[in-house]
Amino acid sequence: MSRDLREILSRQASEVAPDLLGWRLSHTTDEGTVTVALTEVEAYHGADDPASHAFRGPTPRNRVMFGLAGHLYVYRSYGIHWCANVVTGEGGTASAVLLRAGRVTEGNDVVRRRRGERTAECCWARGPGCLGQALGLTGGHSGVDLLGDGALVLRPGARTLPGTRATGPRVGVSRAADVPWRFWLAGEPSVSAYRRAPTAST
């Protein structure tokens, strides 16, 4: 099964991203298991995408992106939030899909503790930083193989039909800002709001 899934993920990020909608990412810790159904994602290519972390080549931070599809790439945003990406494409291409939002389907009590009692359920994993917090991710999880039998597992969920998917420009990037590689489930309340970066260029 993992071989078949890795094959699916070994395409370019812009091809994989819409197919990831509805897939489930689970993380089991001492607190319990939390599962999130993905409702919003963004594709990032490598050397040909100026908005990608891999645009200028490999670094200690992004080296996971240059590896096998199906691994997790985690980075810290603004020094606060841990954001998760699924590595895609052939090895060496540094293609990845940012997991922007999801709907919690398992582990509500755990997520409520992590996100706070006052946070609305639809906002538990709304935005990449919130999704990372809901799942209990840290930089130590970067490089984990999501297709194995470990604590972090990515698996296909209910299939979403093309007509239920929407697409538009990526959020908050200053370069290649109008590239329509953000994909989400139309009408899903967990999807984050679109914000164009003030310094954005086409």
Image: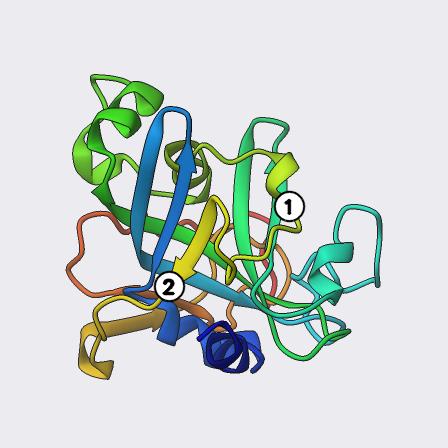
Camera-near label (2 vs 1) is 2
Residue at image coords 57%, 26%: 80
Give how far across and how far down residue 5 sits, in percent.
Answer: 47, 75
Residue 140 in sight in this render: yes
User: In front: 57, or 25?
Assistant: 25
Residue at image x 53%, y 78%?
A: 3
Residue shown at 28%/35% (left/top)?
124
Q: Which residue is mark 1?
A: 142
What amino acid type should be assigned to the residue bearing mark 2?
Answer: Arg
Q: Is residue 194 left or right of residue 8?
A: left
Residue 166: percent from the left, percent from the top?
28, 71
Q: Quadrant of the C terminus?
A: bottom right
As helix, strand or loop, the secondary structure at mark 2 comes to strand
The residue where tag 2 is placed is: 155
- Tag 1 secondary structure: loop
Viewport quadrant of the N terminus: bottom left
Q: Is residue 17 left or right of residue 105?
A: right
The answer to the question of whether label 2 and label 1 lie on touching residues, with beta carbons closer than 8 A, is: no
Structural distance between the alpha carbons of marks 2 and 1: 18 Å
- Left/right placement of residue 130 relative to residue 4 reads left
* Mark 2 or mark 1, earlier in chain: 1
